[in-house]
Image: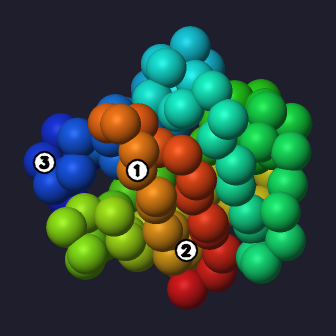
């Protein structure tokens, strides 16, 4: 596993650290104001998704590998709703913050 603090891309590192700390304010701070996301190929409301899948469900990701300069991750993601699953994450970074992320089962 790759600890969040050792991830290559600083913006991705900040977002993963916020998820693992269950810190909604740090999560929001790591995103652009117009950030978007998709889950399993479907665009979702980012705030609603994050609240449901991360912050009220104890979401956590253990990164197995990274590629594309740290903007593509494979991680074991778990939360209280779905348990643990192997997931793929792709990040678009703009001005040092995450502008979009796409996640789904790996």
Pointer 2: what residue? 87
Q: Residue at x 66, y 75 (%)?
A: 104
Say above or below: 13 vs 62: above
- Location of residue 3 in the rendering, given as x and y in whole percent from the top left corner: 21, 49
Say above or below: 104 vs 98: below
Q: Nearer the viewer, residue 43 or 103?
A: 43
Q: Quadrant of the C terminus?
A: bottom right
Comes first in the chain, label 2 or label 3:
3
Pointer 3: what residue? 6
User: In whole angstroms, how far apart are the C-alphas of marks 2 and 1?
Assistant: 19 Å
Secondary structure, mark 1, is strand
Comes first in the chain, label 1 or label 3:
3
Pointer 1: what residue? 93
Secondary structure, mark 2, is strand
Q: Residue at x 64, y 80 (%)?
A: 105
Q: Residue at x 74, y 63 (%)?
A: 38
Q: Quadrant of the N terminus?
A: bottom left
Are there few (<14), some (14-19), or many (20+) residues within 10 Å of tag 3?
Answer: few
């Amino acid at each position: 596993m790759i600890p969040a603090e050792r991830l290559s891309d600083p913006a991705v590192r900040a977002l993963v650290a916020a998820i693992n700390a269950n810190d909604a304010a740090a999560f929001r701070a790591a995103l652009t104001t117009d950030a978007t996301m998709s889950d399993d190929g479907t665009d979702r409301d980012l705030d609603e998704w994050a609240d449901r899948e991360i912050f009220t469900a104890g979401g956590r990701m253990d990164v197995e590998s990274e590629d594309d300069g740290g903007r593509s991750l494979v991680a074991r993601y778990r939360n209280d709703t779905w348990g643990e699953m192997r997931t793929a994450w792709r990040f678009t970074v703009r001005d040092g913050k995450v502008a979009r992320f796409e996640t789904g089962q790996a």
